Image (cartoon, rainbow, N blue to C red):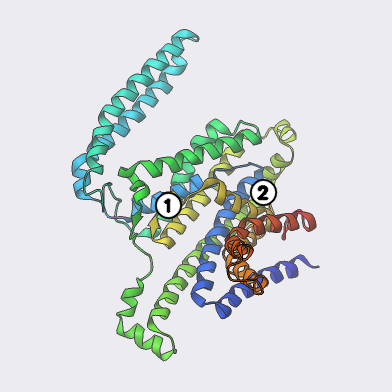
Amino acid sequence: MNPVIKNSALFALMAMLILLTGIMQSWNSALLILNMGLVSAVMALGVNLQWGFAGLFNVGVMGFVALGGLATVLISMPPVPAAWAAGGPGVLLGLLLGAASIGVAIWAYPRLPRGRVRVLGMTVILVIGFIIFRRVFDPAVEAIEAVDPATSGYLGGLGLWVVLSWPVGGVLAAGAAWIIGKSALGLRSDYLAIATLGIAEIVIAVLKNEDWLSRGVKNVIGLPRPVPNEVDLQNDPAFVEQATSLGLDPMTASSLYVKLGYALMFTVVLLILLWLAQKALHSPWGRMMRAIRDNETAAEAMGKDVKGRHLQVFILGSAICGIAGAMMTTLDGQLTPGTYQPLRFTFLIWVMVIVGGSGNNLGAVLGGFLIWFLWVQVEPISALAMEVITAGMAEDSPVRGHLLESAAQLRLLTMGVVLLLVLRFSPRGLIPEK
């Protein structure tokens, strides 16, 4: 089959599945799947850039997504004046002292003679710097977290337009990727996976425990939105009149309007990133990345800076994941660090890339939509199937109760089955790399 026709048919089928959801369930559910599918497609694009272009096995995707979520808080939430007055200067001074101690250690390392003198000198610099840092930083943090801890207890943000947090999330993730890449990209692929997973756990642990920064497990709720609030629309006479003229309940119409607004904004971001990814794929840089992926030794023999190029693509892919994380937090309207589960959601994003087609940007986008659709819809479909299977059993049958309770667990089983089927019948994905 002609690849253009095949790809068009696959995307048309995906659109039909979302439309069927709207017809058979509700349009709110369909638009929610569409919005999260768009965010998932952006994440899959970032992972595909790293794995499909360069063969980098990054299992720390959730760490970069979480940094994007943090950027949403830092940019959009209003500052808390009482917290800043209580400990803001102390936190900033402590962070500067910590960075200065690291800078002194970096400056001193090549200047100290090798051997015990270097080890002793570095130890003294870092230990003294750490002690000074904690002496300044800890009291300031305690003062901030003591300011109305039930509703505040953190510094807040800059109070800017929330959409500005999306590129800032990419910048934060890119900065973290640069630090990680400088130390971990020289490792073999399996060790790189372990390192990135560990660093993702560290990032999420910081978000969960540093209340002064992100309120930790107390969560930051009520994030500003780039679209109107449903309540405001329901109180707008013009909107109510227009919704009524279309035969819609104003409450339902307001929810649909908001979700359509998000869908439009997310679609614009996805199309821009997809266009850039396609330009990169077909550029000399993209061909070089694939040559490095296929044979690092040969590429290095031709004079290519393999580690430098790996660092570039690692930063770019992580930045895209950071943008997706900021978009997802904006859609949720809250930052909940406890929900970032690295193994679970990283696995899901990798399934998107593998099923869609590793190395193909369109395949990554398709995989993002398809796998998210299945992730959401498998549970209600499984519950309905179990109801049919157990229809003839007694109400108090333990087998019936067990089968009905197991419906929710079929999500991961379905993901595994889908992955196995694709790897068996289309091992390069639904839209394979050319």
In the picture, measured across the screen, residue 298 lies left or right of residue 201, that is: right
Most extreme residue toward the right is 1
Is residue 354 visible in this depiction of the protein?
yes
Q: Is residue 168 above or below residue 134?
A: below
Q: Locate residue 163: give its quadrant.
A: bottom left
Q: Residue at x 42, y 75 (%)?
A: 255
Type of amino acid under label 2: Gly
Q: Which mark is residue 52?
A: 2
Mark nearest the camera among 1 and 2 is 1
Q: Which residue is mark 1?
A: 69
Residue 394 point in image, percent of width and height: 62, 71
Is residue 305 visible in this depiction of the protein?
no
Question: Closer to the camera, 161 or 428?
Answer: 428
Q: Is residue 83 above or below residue 27?
A: above
- Where disc 2 sits, the SS reads helix
Labels 1 and 2 touching (C-beta < 8 A): no
Placement of the C terminus among the 4 image quadrants:
bottom right
**Dot 1 crowding, Cα within 10 Å, few <14, some 14–19, many 20+:** many
Q: Exactly how many numbered labels are in the figure?
A: 2
Q: Locate residue 128: give its quadrant.
A: top left
Residue 229 point in image, percent of width and height: 35, 71
In the picture, measured across the screen, residue 349 lies left or right of residue 125, that is: right
Q: Earlier in the sequence, mark 1 or mark 2?
A: 2
Residue 340 point in image, percent of width and height: 48, 49
In the picture, measured across the screen, residue 351 lies left or right of residue 22, that is: right
Residue 123 point in image, percent of width and height: 41, 16
Could you give the CA–CA distance between mark 1 and mark 2, rounded to whole angstroms? 25 Å
- Where disc 1 sits, the SS reads helix
Q: Residue at x 69, y 70 (%)?
A: 8
Q: Residue at x 60, y 58 (%)?
A: 409
Q: Is residue 51 above or below residue 186?
A: below
